[in-house]
Image (spheres, rainbow, N blue to C red):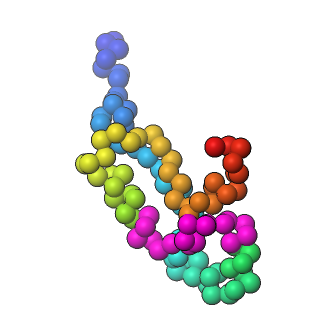
Amino acid sequence: MDPQACHKPRVGDAGIPLNAVAPGLVRTELLKHLFEDSATQERIEAGSPMPLGGPYEPEAAAELLARLASETNGHMTGQTISLDGGADVVLRGDSVW
């Protein structure tokens, strides 16, 4: 059997950028009730601090996803992008970076 006959192009080989988005707190209908109660909101912010604007609207994630999936994205692939308002940086601390 020809070894090339079994070769199936992987996503990267096919020129398709494959990335992931790790979202922080997004203001969706599912989480809406959490942001209405100030005590709950304080607990959430303590556990997932987002110093760059706090919880965000879904459009912010949509814009990033559109950019990552667009034809203009010719070089970024195989990445997980944290869209978490800085929570990961705050929680991990300076020693990681």
Q: In front here: 2 or 31?
A: 31
* Residue 56 x, y percent position in the rendering: 51, 72
Q: Residue furthest left?
A: 71
* Residue 63 x, y percent position in the rendering: 37, 63
Q: Which residue is pictured at 51% across the width and 76% down the height?
A: 28
The magenta stretch is 45-61
Q: In front here: 29 or 53?
A: 53
Q: Is residue 27 magenta?
A: no
User: Quarter of the image holding residue 33?
Assistant: bottom right
Q: Which residue is pictured at 36% across the width and 51% down the height?
A: 68
Image height of 87 relative to 31, above or below = above
Q: Quadrant of the C terminus?
A: top right
Q: Which residue is pictured at 40% across the width and 59% down the height?
A: 64
Q: Is residue 46 magenta?
A: yes
Image height of 53 relative to 94, above or below = below
User: Quarter of the image holding residue 75?
Assistant: top left
Direction from residue 93 to residue 73 in the image, left or right: left
Image height of 87 relative to 35, above or below = above
Q: Quadrant of the N terminus?
A: top left
* Residue 3 x, y percent position in the rendering: 35, 14
* Residue 40 x, y percent position in the rendering: 72, 81
Q: Which residue is pictured at 52% across the width and 80% down the height?
A: 29
